[in-house]
Amino acid sequence: MGRITRAVSTYYETPDQSTPFAATMVRESRPTVSNEQPYHRETTLGSEWVRVDYGWVSDPSMVIIRNLDDKDVIEISLVVRDGKPLVDRPHLLLSPRDVFEGCPSSGTSIWVKSPVKSIRYSVTVLPK
């Protein structure tokens, strides 16, 4: 079986602060229970909601979405009814060049769209 290893550090600092505040420091590793290969794809996102494609991964342990645009955000929705995102506004905003990581519960899809134009993004799906 495979292994997922994460190392994430997020810091916050102000101009007058000599030592940054460590907002998040995650280091974790866990084995996978599947022999599935990870799925990765770069594609273009438009102004309509689209469901994030998990490729051949039937039961994801982690979905990583990266905004490849330098200026515009990606809108993310996690609530779904009748196969469509149930939103009048997005649940999350993914800043330019930033990354979203999450594990959708069984039967839940992640939906994304661009509020302004077509932009590039990538999706990586890791199996359980």
Image (spheres, rainbow, N blue to C red):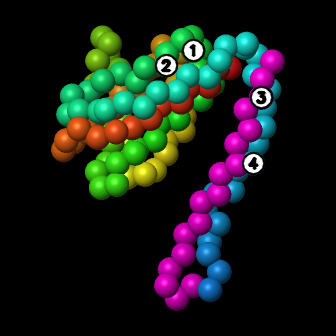
Residue 48 screen position, x and y as percent: 21, 28
The image shows residue 82, relative to residue 48, as above or below, that is above
The quadrant where residue 79 appears: top left
Q: Amino acid at mark 2?
A: Tyr
Q: CA distance from mark 3 to mark 4?
A: 13 Å
Q: Residue 27: which numbered mark, if any?
A: 4
Report the span colored magenta: 1-17
Write down the residue under mark 3. 3
With respect to residue 43, does 59 lie above or below?
above
- Looking at the image, residue 14 lies above or below residue 47: below
Residue, x 50% and y 80% (percent of image)?
Answer: 14
The nearer-to-camera label among 1 and 4 is: 1
Q: In x, y percent, where is residue 108?
A: 46, 19
The type of residue carrying mark 1 is Val
Q: Earlier in the sequence, mark 3 or mark 4?
A: 3
Q: Quadrant of the C terminus?
A: top right
For marks 4 and 2, give the one nearer the viewer. 2
Q: Quadrant of residue 126?
A: top right
Which tag, 4 or 2, sits closer to the chain's start?
4
Q: CA distance from mark 2 to mark 1?
A: 6 Å
